[in-house]
Structures are given as structure tokens and as C-alpha cells.
Amino acid sequence: MAEPLPELSLLETRILGTLLEKQRTVPDTYPLSVNALQAGCNQKTSRNPVIEAAEADIVQALDTLKGLWLVNEVSGSRVSRFEHRLEKILGLPTQATALLAVLMLRGPQTAGELRLNCERLHRFADISSVEAFLEELASREAGALVVELPRLPGARENRWMHLLSGQPEIDAAPAARSAPASQEVEALKARVAALEAEMAEMRERLAALGA
């Protein structure tokens, strides 16, 4: 596709991610009906955030995706079924779409988390191969599809997120949220120290009574 994609909504990316996932994990039921798509989008496991999309919302989002040629309605069945065209439209290998699918379904993740969560879609040999495909997605001439996020306070690895819904809002919120947490830790340490002092005093009193 010559022109960049418009920003997709959370539900639209959830539908694409679900189609990619089910194509590889339950190929016998793929393409998916609207009911199957709704169930996949609203799963309580392997989804972040968890959503509750109504059937009408699914149908409306599918219409948008069909207009962008990202989804195709399959004929020849009594029930309408749908398949994704993400690899064809964006010119991506299956390894890259596996990573995109997991990012669309589970939100930002580290390369290590992506390798683990992609296991059923594509088995990466090591974290280096995951990072290589992420770098390719981030440096596409046609437009980046993923971005590496700033490292969170206390984190050992950077997380990645997809860009199909636009650029992320990056601010100092994570750092600001860490301050209350550190204050809570210090307060707990102070309480523990106070309790230990009280226990030591009680032991001394008991020892004196015993004497």
C-alpha cells in the first residue's frame, strides 16, 4: 500500500490481532464468523486491555477494515466469515505479523515477553531474532509499525508497542507514579523497624520478670 494507513481504533486492532491469532492457532475454524470474532475480541485471557465489544460494534469495525482492504469477507457460506489481509497489504513476513498480533492483543511488551507470548503463532529461536524483526518493523521505509518505549523506572528491558493506532503519548507519568511507591516502601520499613524495637523492649521486660 503506497499511502500510510489511517489510525485504527482499539477494536479495529483487536479484530486484526484476533484474526491473525486464530488463523494460526485454530486454522480449522478460520476464517471467522462475527460471533467467533466477538468471542475472540472479548476474551478474558491473553488480552490487554480486556474489552466488552457488542456485535454491532464488531460489524461496524469490520466495515471500516474492509474499506481499508485489511479484512476480506469470504463468500460461499451461509454465515459471513472474515479473514485478514495484513501481510499482503503491508508486505510483511509471517514472523513480523506474529509480533504485531501479540502487540495488538496484549499491549506493550519486552522482546522477552514477545518471544514467550508468540510461541503459538511463531517460534522464535532466541530474543535476538525477535529484536531483529522489531527493528525492521520500526525502520520500514513505508512507515514504522512499532516503536521502542522509554524504559520504565526499575525495569531491566525496554518495551515495544505497535503504531497502528498512532504514536503513543510518552510523558513522565511512570516516573511520577514511582514516587508514591517508594514512599510506601520507606513507610513500611519504618513500621517494621518500630515493631522490631517494640519486640526487643518486650523481650527485655520478660527477661527481667523471669529473673
Image (spheres, helix red, strand yellow):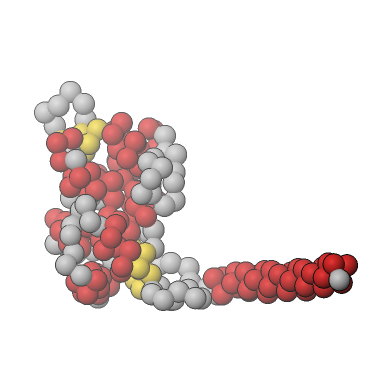
Tell me residue 153's x, y (percent).
Answer: 51, 76
In the displayed structure, does residue 79 sit left or right of residue 114?
left
**Residue lying farthest to the left in this orientation:** 76
Give the quarter of the figure containing the C terminus.
Answer: bottom right
Determine the residue located farthest toward the front in the rendered image: 211
Is residue 141 in sight in this rendering? no
Q: Which quadrant of the structure image shows residue 5?
A: bottom left
Residue 159 x/y as whole percent = 38, 70
Q: Is 41 displayed left or right of 194 in the figure?
A: left
Count the labels in the image.
0
Q: Residue at x 17, y 23 (%)?
A: 78
Residue sitting at x 82%, y 70%? 207
* Depicted 140 relative to depicted 72: above or below: below
Where is residue 42, by image quadrant? top left
Name the one closer to the observer, 141 or 38. Answer: 38
Q: Residue at x 28, y 60 (%)?
A: 116
Q: Residue at x 20, y 53 (%)?
A: 121
Residue 171 can be seen, yes or no? yes
Q: Residue 97, percent across and down?
A: 21, 58
Quadrant placement of the N terminus: bottom left
Q: Is residue 96 above or below residue 189?
A: above
> Measured along the vertical axis of the image, is residue 166 above or below residue 201?
above
**Among all residues in the image, which is located at the extreme top?**
78
Above or below, comparing residue 61 to residue 1 in the picture: above
- Image position of 20 (left or right of 11): left
The part of the image, by quadrant, that contains residue 173 is bottom right
* Residue 67: x %, y % from top left: 26, 46
